Image (cartoon, rainbow, N blue to C red):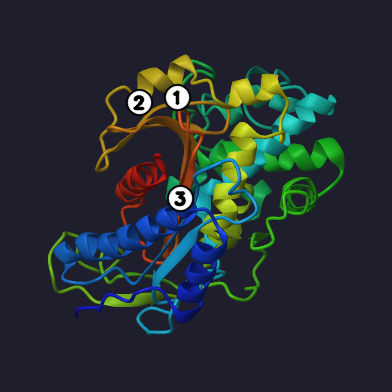
Amino acid sequence: MAWPVVALSTLAAATLAVACSSQPDSAGSVESALDETVIQIRSSQGEPWGITLPGLAAAAIAGPDDGDRVPRVVSGSSDPPGNTELIPSDRFHVGSVTKTFTAALIMQLDQSGELSLSDPISNWIRYPGGSKITVEMLMGHTSGIPDFSELPGRKRTDTPEQSIAFASRTKRLFAPGSQWSYSNTNYTMLGVIAERATGATWADQVRSRFFEPLALSETYVWEGESRPRTVDGSRLNCGYPGEPKCVQRPGFEIVPVTDGSDWTVAWAAGAIVSTPSDLARWIDQLVGGEVLDAEHRRLLTSPTPQSIEALSGSPSYGAVRWTGGSLGLLRYAIDGQGTGWGHEGSINGFVSNVVRMDESGRSVAVASNFLQTDSFAALGELVTAVNDAARP
């Protein structure tokens, strides 16, 4: 079944008209570039499947004066396979982009002395060999702890403590600190450590430290209840148990995602709901602002040797590839555009991606309520479009 390309909603178009009349021409050019690119991505990425991508949203901070009004666009449906149009304030599950908030929280606790990055996790968590695994190793994915989300037999209703216990029954991947391997368990542990070090919940801490002071009003922690307007997720009817393998060919049906158990179990590793405009503000302030002091910003934007080695042969997604990871972020290389720091997310029915480019300082975010959207390729195209539009 084919989906028509849906242009900006009436509200988005009205927002664009106001923006163009009250903002510098460069801001209007960036928004127009985002709009055109989002529509093009929905068409080009959907073509191999014989569809148009159900929904896509993007935002960018292209200049130093854009922080208070972030150019943003939306295109498509908020309730696929329905046809209710997306609006700019619609919220998406952003999956592992959540880890950037957890990393920032741990960095702030290190700054205040409530914990140290060099502390062994055994100070807070009982885990085999925990005395040789540090907080820093969790943040940089060098702990050797397996990813509970990839282990057979786990329960998708597990609490954070149960997820950690489940991982503890599996052999470690490598000696702590010796290699790099991405693991959701690392960030679940960091959430538990933050709670035990402070006596406050992880959710309350990210709200009070980041959402509220940075005015990220469209961002919240998923705790089992949807807030308006949080959009519906979707996917093709392939790749799940009992379904055919997902291969790029026409014939698959777009189906809604109603099983959101991972939205909860992901917790400090993936439970945040947000919008591309809030994510663009967040990465801009995290990497280039005063969320952290200079030393911790340096740690956040310095790749570890283990990650450089592990990702040296990583594949490209369109024009984008990872070339290293820090204590909380991943280094992006985008063909023709340079490097930047950000994170991606993928969770039941949703994908997202966000980056702040090193040379230009521009921040770009994208989110989709369709699991098969290639957020890396989309991000690369959007960064290129924003750079072209923002250049004098």
Residue at left 74%, top 53%? 203
In this rendering, is residue 326 above or below 344?
above
- Relative to residue 383, is residue 354 drawn left or right? right
Q: Is residue 151 visible?
A: no
Q: Is residue 223 above or below residue 257?
A: above
Q: CA distance from mark 1 to mark 2?
A: 9 Å
Residue indicated by mark 2: 311
Q: Classify mark 1: helix, strand or loop.
A: loop
| Mark 3 vs 1: CB contact within 8 A | no
| Local SS, label 3 | helix
- Quadrant of the image for the N terminus? bottom left
Q: Nearer the viewer, mark 1 or mark 2?
A: 2
Determine the secondary structure under disc 2: helix
| Among numbered discs 3 and 1, the one appearing first in the sequence | 3
Is the residue under label 2 in contact with that under label 1 (CB below 8 Å)? yes
Residue 64 position by quadrant = top right
* Image point (40%, 39%), residue name: 392
Mark toward the viewer: 3 or 1: 3
Other residues around mark 1 within 10 Å, as few (<14) / some (14–19) / many (≥20): many
- Residue 142 in percent (x, y) is at 52, 24
Q: Is residue 340 above or below residue 245?
A: above
1 or 2: tag closer to the N-terminus: 1
Q: Are marks 3 and 2 in contact (CB under 8 Å)?
A: no
Residue at the spot 69% in from the left edge and 42% down from the top edge = 191
Mark 2: amino acid: Leu
Q: Which residue is mark 1?
A: 180
- In the shown orientation, is residue 346 left or right of residue 277? left
> Where does label 3 land, which residue?
26
